[in-house]
Amino acid sequence: MTDHTTLPHRFFLSISLLSILAGSQPDLTKELVSLRSSSESGVIRLNDDTVSKFITSVPYSLIIFFNSADLNSNPLQEFLSEFAFVSASFIANNNRSDVANKLFFCEIDESSDSESFGLFGIQFLPQICLVDPLMENLQDKTGRMEEEDVDGTEESVLEFIESRTNLTVGPLRRPPLLSKTQISVIAALIAISAPFLIKKVLNGETIFNNNRVWLYGVVLVYFFSVSGTMHNIIKGVPMFVRDHQDSNKLVFFYEGANFQLGAEGLSFGLLYNVVGLLLAYVSNALVRVRNVSEQRVVMMLAMVVSLLAVKKVVYLNNWKTGYQIQTYWPSSWH
């Protein structure tokens, strides 16, 4: 038998619970707005403690960039910068409308918040995931960018957001490289120094008239060429990475032919430079020394150092690729 006196209490209790649940959503939205305003680009940094709070029964969508600072990967950080650029453009284009509070840009770093990676089932980086109010399974791959679509550009992020939501990011507003004040200062410095520079050029007193400058320039060009520096810059190859087993340990040489670190190329380039400079010195400067004994001593030292450098290059190449250089002696020596 039902006690009719308890019905009003149950009714008011239900209303109170609904009010609390309904009121918590605006509170979460206000908290996200506050966190976004404290970020220069509008990207909110989530951690293992806050991620579960902001993804449960919410009226907004989260676009999450999964990052890892331990990888020390330049392409990954450049993609994060492009992601932040899209975030800043979205806020600037929709700041005066309610659309700005329907989508929030977030970041989760694996190096400090690995539990969140397991919550979403992240298996590769970079990865971008959209969490909308209708999502029931956080590991659902329909809300993620396909691996082949992650090309590291802001256009790919923009296309992903507008194709998965009913929101429009708007035009991308890339900030200028130089501000108006900086341009004015540079123009004033050029105007003031132009007469002095023209006078030095006409009198042949510039650094380009110094033979040593050209000599050092040639050596640097050779070093950058043989060390693969241009490849590292274009591909964004990191100088080193952190050891997966010990995050406090840095790895400068990666064993395996499928990946090369920047430190490896610089090491090979330095060894090549040593041999090249010794050869240039022996063929251009040492031959002019009149003391034969001094010539012989310097020549022997140059040969020993060159031999050690070449031996080190062969050893590192064998360690990294497994390729061995076969030695063939003349048949008359057998």
Image (spheres, rainbow, N blue to C red):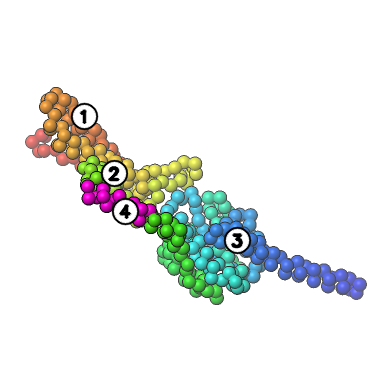
Rendered image: mark on residue 184 = none
Q: Are marks 3 and 2 in contact (CB under 8 Å)?
A: no
Residue 59 occupies which quadrant of the picture? bottom right
Q: Which residue is mark 1?
A: 301
**Helix, strand or loop at mark 3:** helix
Image position of 134 (left or right of 278)? right
Q: CA distance from mark 1 to mark 4?
A: 50 Å
Q: Which residue is mark 4?
A: 194
At x 44%, y 57%, the residue is 182
Q: Which residue is mark 2?
A: 269
What amino acid does circle 1 point to?
Answer: Leu
Task: Report the mark closest to the observer, 3 or 2.
Answer: 3
Bounds of the magenta segment = 189-203
290 above or below 22? above
Q: CA distance from mark 2 to mark 4?
A: 39 Å
Task: Report the mark closest to the observer, 2 or 4.
Answer: 4
What amino acid does circle 4 point to?
Answer: Ala
Label 1 or label 3, whichever comes before in sequence order? 3
Q: Are marks 2 and 4 in contact (CB under 8 Å)?
A: no
Q: Residues within 10 Å of mark 1 (few under 14, many from 20)?
A: few
**Visible residue check, residue 192:** yes
At x 64%, y 61%, the residue is 34
